[in-house]
Image (tube, rainbow, N blue to C red):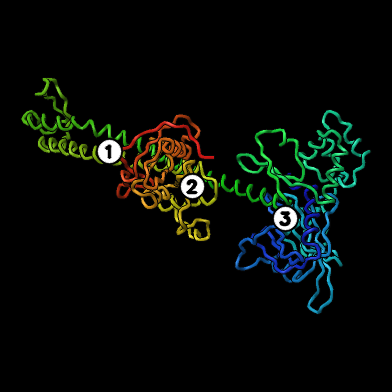
Amino acid sequence: MSYDGVVTCAMVQELKDNILYGKIEKIYQPQPDQLLLQIHTSAGKKRLFVSVSGNHSAVYLVDKTPENPADPPLFCMVLRKHLGAARITDIRQHESDRIIEIFLETVDELGFGLNRKLILEIMGKHSNALLVDMQTGKIIDSIKHVGIDVNRARQLLPGKLYEYPPAQPKLPFTRLTEEDVASLMQNQLQPERSLLKGIGGFSPALAETMALSDSAFEWLEKLRSSIRDSRFTPLVYVKEGGPADFHITPLAAYEEDDSFESLNFDTLSRAAEYFFVNRESSNTIRQKAGELRRLIKGQTDKLKLKMQRLNEDLQKAENSEKYRLCGELLTANLHMVKPGMKSVQVTSYYDGSEVNIPLDPRFSPAKNAQNYYKKYGKSKTAVKEKQLQLEETALEIEYLESVSAFIDRAKSIEELDLLRNELTESGYLRFRKNSDKSRINRKGKPKPHSYRLPSGKTVLVGRNNKENDWLTFKKAASSDIWFHTKDIPGSHVILFTEGQAPSREELFRAASIAAFHSKASASANVPVDYVKVKHVKKPSGSKPGYVTFTHNKTLFVDPAIPE
């Protein structure tokens, strides 16, 4: 629970410091479960972002306005009608819950003053944003309508009286006394569970941190004081897979684990934005990557099955010599065949062995001999066709494995979208009619990974097969050096020599980069081929990223990139 009651309390304080007494200028609804309020303050324009989605429920200030739909949703229109030019008079937290109330003053069409309240419930999948008339206490509208079929105890519909979520039997952390803390800490075996059950606004990680502190009440007092004075230092805990948690105080569960790194931020809004945007991005990347992996695995499995069947057919076709032998022996012994015979036994003039030749009684002996010659001819042709199909299938499998390697190394949604676009153009995916709304940048300039060696030379690395082709055949000069892992899917890597002969150290460093950007990035002593770009050729009609080369040499290196 990243956005707990304590973070909510701190965010309310931050919002008071930034947007209190500000005037709402514009209201947007970028997504069905998002809001953005542009507020004019004495310090300039501020943007309040609200998300009530299940996996991204939060409220914080942002610097940029996200892209908005051409036609605003109904709730956005309601807010514009009732809150246009409204002034923020107060911002409060309800008890210690994850509920933020923004009090607003505005006027109606006749110029009479009105009081409204925008209630933001930040409660995971139950999150909601509601506009309430303070005089009647009734809901004007909500971003999510909750009817009796969804919740019998609490309906959130226009015209209904607004009711707070059922209160839990907990003490708000803002009103805890030293005696209350001492009473909760009596459970010596599991004090963190007692704190979690007894204190409102605490997440499990925060309760554990308090339980492990030297003095629980002093720790709590310090936390409350930092919120009152806005002296907290927000931090985000990150791991290799992305952000794990964030808070306004260090959390013991992550501080004691060396696999987590903490990032400090100057404001809570920036910490929250970094956490949610990157976590959402990480989840999206995993989802998109998983989808592409499943697609490639399905295509690869089909191609491997095709190869198996082609090999079986090829083996049968390669045993076609028996048809030629039967045709020759039958032609030489036509006098031995009587009409209606189903087989004939003749002596082979090659080794003297007896050969039994099956016959079709419907045809004459000469016609049977001709049929055997036809079978022999078809088999010889089949051998060439099957071998050609085998080569094409092997190249397809090699291509899909290279795309799979790029998917494993993709770090952004843009890279995955480019790979999806490449698969679409290669015929493995159907073209989507709404692809123009996706993040695929068809006409954008390639953006390969760039590294600078200690010597000052530049090394560029392709992020996908199409970028590999661009890098090798359009960007690089003929005298630059091309690198690729030997018989291992990976990126094309170019060392730009600037017309100078590369040193041994530069070659090894560039080869290490090539090994790092390959499927063997977790291995050691990886073989990497390198050659001048002028010796690299692309066969006509070949798949993206496929090349042939000569005059190559091989280095064995450990994967690494420059610091």
- Sequence-wise, the earlier of marks 3 and 2 is 3
- Which one is in front, 273 or 315? 273
Residue identified by numbered label 3: 60
Q: Amino acid at mark 2?
A: Ser
Mark closer to the observer (3, 2) = 2
Going 45% across and 29% down the picture, which residue do you hit?
525
Residue 262 % position (x, y): 69, 41
In the rendered structure, find residue 450 and report the number of the disc placed on it.
2
Residue 361 % position (x, y): 16, 35
Going 51% across and 42% down the picture, which residue do you hit?
409
Q: Amino acid at mark 3?
A: Tyr
Cα distance between the residues tagged 1 and 2: 41 Å
Q: Amino acid at mark 1?
A: Gln
Mark closer to the observer (1, 3) = 3
Q: Residue 305: which quarter of the image?
A: top left
- Give the side of residue 461 with respect to residue 369, left or right: right
Name the residue at the left extreme: 335
Dot 2: within a 10 Å radius of its alpha carbon, few (fewer than 14), some, or many (20 or more) residues? Answer: few
Which image quadrant: the N terminus? Answer: top right
Residue identified by numbered label 1: 387
